[in-house]
Each structure stands twice: as structure tokens, then as C-alpha cells.
Image: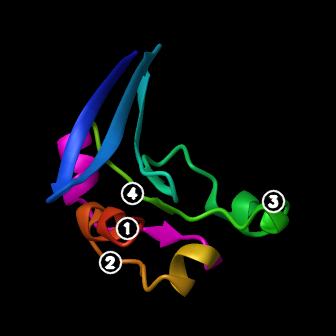
């Protein structure tokens, strides 16, 4: 497992997490407010069964590195992320910037 600081904007640093597992790597970039993650994230579960938690999150598919996660378009986002102006198609970096 690797955790790295990711400078986003002046004075704003997100945390990148990479977990190497057999045949896959889990990737996430988080702020105190929310996070983006690789295709392993189940946005439907967050929106439905965990709606009361009001989780701010986005999912990108087909990414293999933290750099790719930040560059990739969000494939899906939670309802709470949409309330912050985060939309599918927005880059991971743009989504993270709105999570501060």
C-alpha cells in the first residue's frame, strides 16, 4: 500500500492511495470532504443503500495509476457529488478541486 500527497491547488493537498491486490490495484484520491476512486467503487450502493451517509464520491474506469485517475473522466458520481457541481465526464482533478 502506498499513500502520497497530491498537491491540487495552492494550499490544498489531497491524499492518493494505491493498494496492490492480486490481479488488480485499488486507487483513490481523497480530501476531507469526499473522494474519487477506480472502477471498484459502487456508486449505486452509495446512492441507494448508503444514501443516509451523504457520501461525496466519483468513479473512473480503466485507470491503472493515480495520475490516470486524476486525468480520467468521471464515469459516475454520487448524488451528493452532483450537488457540489461534480458531473460525469469531468476530470478526476476537477472533481477533487470541488471537494475542498
Tell me if residue 86 comes above or below residue 12 in the rendering.
below
Q: Is residue 16 above or below residue 25?
A: below
**How far from the left and from the top, in percent, is residue 21?**
47, 16
Crowdedness near tag 4: few (<14), some (14–19) or many (≥20) residues, C-alpha within 10 Å: many
The disc placed on residue 60 is: 4
Q: Earlier in the sequence, mark 4 or mark 3?
A: 3
Say which label, 2 or 3, has the lower sequence index: 3
Q: Is residue 32 left or right of residue 78?
A: left
**Disc 4, SS:** loop
Residue 78 counted in the magenta span: yes
Please tell me in which quadrant of the rendered image residue 45 appears. bottom right
For marks 1 and 4 on the same chain, the one whose residue lies earlier in the sequence: 4
State if disc 4 and disc 1 touch (CB < 8 Å). yes
For the residues labelled 2 and 1, say whether their Cβ atoms are less than 8 Å apart: yes
Q: Would you say 20 lies left or right of 71 here?
A: right
Residue at horizontal 42 percent and vertical 68 percent from the top: 75
Numbered circle sitting on residue 50: 3
| Mark 1 vs mark 4, CA separation in Å | 5 Å
Please give the range of residues in magenta.
65-79
Whichever of labels 2 and 1 marks the residue nearer the N terminus, that label is 1
Frontmost of labels 3 and 1 is 3
Residue appearing at x 47%, y 48% in the figure: 39
The earlier-in-sequence mark between 2 and 4 is 4
Residue identified by numbered label 2: 89
Distance, label 2 to label 1, CA atoms, is 5 Å
Front one among 76 and 5: 5
Q: What residue sits right under mark 1 in the picture?
A: 74
Q: Report the front residue among 100 and 72.
A: 100
Other residues around mark 1 within 10 Å, as few (<14) / some (14–19) / many (≥20): many
Amino acid at each position: 500500500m502506498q499513500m502520497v500527497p497530491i498537491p491540487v491547488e495552492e494550499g490544498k493537498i489531497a491524499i492518493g492511495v494505491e493498494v496492490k491486490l492480486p490481479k488488480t490495484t485499488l486507487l483513490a484520491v481523497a480530501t476531507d470532504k469526499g473522494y474519487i476512486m477506480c472502477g471498484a467503487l459502487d456508486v449505486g450502493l452509495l446512492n441507494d443503500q448508503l444514501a443516509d451517509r451523504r457520501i461525496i464520491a466519483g468513479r473512473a474506469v480503466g485507470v491503472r495509476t493515480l495520475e490516470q485517475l486524476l486525468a480520467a473522466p468521471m464515469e459516475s458520481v454520487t448524488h451528493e457529488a452532483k450537488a457540489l457541481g461534480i458531473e460525469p465526464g469531468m476530470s478526476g482533478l476537477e472533481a477533487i478541486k470541488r471537494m475542498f
